[in-house]
Amino acid sequence: MKMWLCTAIIFTLVGVSIAQQAMDCNCSKADINGSGRVELRDFARLAANWLKSGTNLTGDLDDSRSVNFTDLRLLHSHWLESCNEYIQQLTVQDCNGQSEQLFLQDAAGTRFTITTQGDNLYFEDTIRANCCKQELYLKVTVAGSKITIYETEIIDVYCLCMCNYPTTAILGPFDNGTYTVEVFDIDENSLGTIEIVISSQ
């Protein structure tokens, strides 16, 4: 809680002091840890190099060879922004089932369905995540004919229970072709692969 408060205060000060600077960076650069979203873990990586100088510094968003208030302002300009161009719509419903056993493995695994809608995909799954999750979102990457979907949670305080969150998303657009789609859960375990055909014609 204290870290969030300090972060909010610093970002407010930065926004006031240098909001008029024209310099900017794109969202993917502000996504320092590559999660697909600009959030606290990116701030932590920037803070680890705070006021350091040198080359190839994590958090040097303006390529000035130092990590300072300008970089913090650039991070703030994309705060909580999704940097994933393939996520058109995402809906995460409230918990519809709870387990008090945090480390209990579900033998059946998480089930997901993917159907095509023109050059988009309709994704549906019941994501199993911590009861005290702050947010759930998806990260989507495309490499050739491989589409990978990562289920990701943001969490501040862990609870000793897990919840099931019904989730739907519209992903795309994708080029026409045959793709292998693999889905990973929040613990980076593969939930399986399917083959789909995108044909918008």
Image: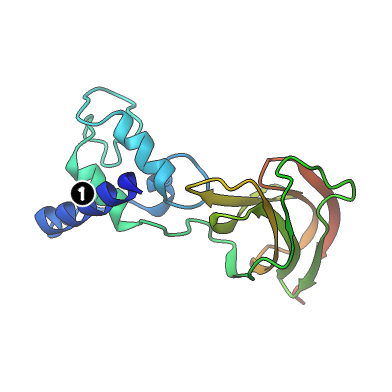
Q: Amino acid at mark 1?
A: Ile
Residue plotted at (82% across, 64% down) = 113
Residue placed most toward the observer, 60 or 102: 102
Residue placed most toward the observer, 6 or 63: 6
Q: Horizontal and vertical percent for residue 107?
A: 89, 46
Residue plotted at (55% across, 45% down) = 158
**Is 115 placed left or right of 30 in the picture?**
right
Q: Residue furthest right?
A: 108
Q: For residue 81, say whether it is visible.
A: yes
Instruction: Name the element at disc 1.
Output: helix
Residue placed most toward the observer, 119 or 192: 192
Residue that badge 1 annotates: 10
Residue plotted at (36% across, 56% down) = 79
**Is 3 placed left or right of 143 in the picture?**
left
Residue plotted at (66% across, 52% down) = 129
**Is 51 placed left or right of 103 in the picture?**
left
Q: Horizontal and vertical percent for residue 148?
A: 70, 49
Quadrant in which residue 94 is drawn: bottom right
Q: For residue 199, say whether it is visible.
A: no
Quadrant for the C terminus in the image: bottom right
Q: Horizontal and vertical percent for residue 15?
A: 18, 57
Pointer 1: residues within 10 angstroms few (<14), some, or many (20+)? some
Q: Horizontal and vertical percent for residue 57?
A: 32, 28
Quadrant in which residue 64 is drawn: top left
